[in-house]
Image (cartoon, helix red, strand yellow):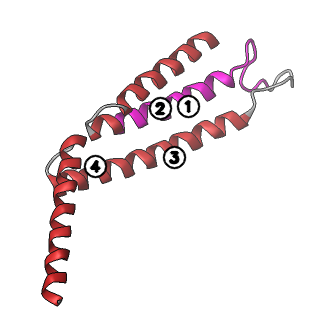
Amino acid sequence: MILAFAATAAALFGVGAYMLLQRDLIRIVVGVALISQSSVVALIGASLTRGHAPIDVSTGESYSDPVPQALVLTALVIGLATLALLLALVHRVVVAYRTAHHDELAAEEIAIEQQLQRDQQRDSNEMT
């Protein structure tokens, strides 16, 4: 069972890393979300105990450690907040630049920077 969790975490991380290398901003956000979820699966897999109930009140024996469970909940909340922030940033970029592709954004930023340099040069020529 633990091998299944490890394989799932590795697959999620691999797919997430592949998505991070894409040129589309939405795919980059999906890659970040998948890597976040792979950490959750890895934490769940690491906290498994074989043959023990999560809480066994009748025998008073060992029970599962609550620290990994708290870490998973914290990772879920942080992952959701990060995902919301990234989606808001992508939405703002798409509204401002009318594209979500990295290459088109880079070309437009270069054009804007060249326009600013021309404006600065024109202003400095007018001053002299």
Q: Please identify the quarter of the rendering in which residue 28 is found.
A: top left
How far apart marks 2 and 3 lie (CA) works out to 12 Å
Numbered circle sitting on residue 35: 2
Q: In this view, does 67 lie above or below 116?
A: above
Is the Cβ of the residue at disc 2 closer than 8 Å to that at disc 1? Answer: yes
Of pointers 3 and 1, the one earlier in the residue sequence: 1
* Image coords of residue 57 (percent x, y): 80, 26
Numbered circle sitting on residue 90: 4
Query: Label 3's element?
Result: helix
Does 66 sit left or right of 89 as displayed?
A: right
Does 75 sit left or right of 63 as displayed?
A: left
Q: In this view, does 72 lie above or below 109?
A: above
Query: Label 2's element?
Result: helix
Q: What residue is pinned by disc 3?
A: 78
4 or 1: mark nearer the eye: 4
Residue shown at 72% from the left, 35% from the top: 66
Which residue type does callout 2 highlight?
Ile
Q: Please identify the quarter of the rendering in which residue 95 is found.
A: bottom left
How far apart marks 2 and 4 lie (CA) works out to 18 Å
Q: Which residue extends farthest right? A: 60
Q: In this view, does 94 lie above or below 76?
A: below
